[in-house]
Image (cartoon, rainbow, N blue to C red):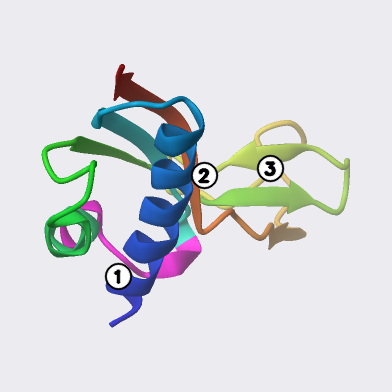
Amino acid sequence: MHEFSLCQNLLNQVLETAQKHHASAVKRIDACLGPQTGIQAEQLCAAFVTASAGTAAAQAELRIEALAPLMHCQGCGKEYSVESGSLNCPACSSTNTVPLPAATLLITNVELVL
């Protein structure tokens, strides 16, 4: 289960941060999910409930923002996110574009209970 391994990695990082700051619990975790994972935010949140059970993050709220795919225009060099559904470059309208690798899962904020 790919979702569970992602959650376990996220949880390990969060628990290390909590321990480093002598927190009694983790209140909230904000993260961004890259489009190339093939995982939905709902699946990740469900796996987090299981992965965090019995830890300082067991009651934490996990908020996931799904990122739009990122592209690079080989014509003009512009990097842009694909939010409109069109892969054409918004700067020069070129179709000579390639996808950029996106971070699998990036923690953007952790709220701790001290």
In the image, 63: left or right of 99?
A: left
Amino acid type for the residue under numbered disc 3:
Cys
If you read the primary sequence from the N terminus, does the residue marked by circle 3 or circle 1 appear first? 1
- Residue, disc 3: 89
Contact flag, marks 3 and 2 (Cβ < 8 Å): no
- Residue occupying image coordinates x 35% and y 77%: 2
Q: Residues within 10 Å of mark 1 (few under 14, many from 20)?
A: some
Residue 67 visible from this viewpoint: no
Per the model, the C-alpha gap separating discs 3 and 2 is 9 Å
Rendered location of residue 78, percent (x, y): 79, 37
Rendered location of residue 7, percent (x, y): 33, 61
- Residue occupying image coordinates x 37% and y 70%: 38
Number of the label disc, if any, that sits on residue 82:
2
- What segment is highlighted magenta in the picture? 36-43
State whether the magenta stretch is mostly helix, strand or loop. Answer: helix
Rendered location of residue 104, percent (x, y): 51, 59
- Residue occupying image coordinates x 65% and y 38%: 80
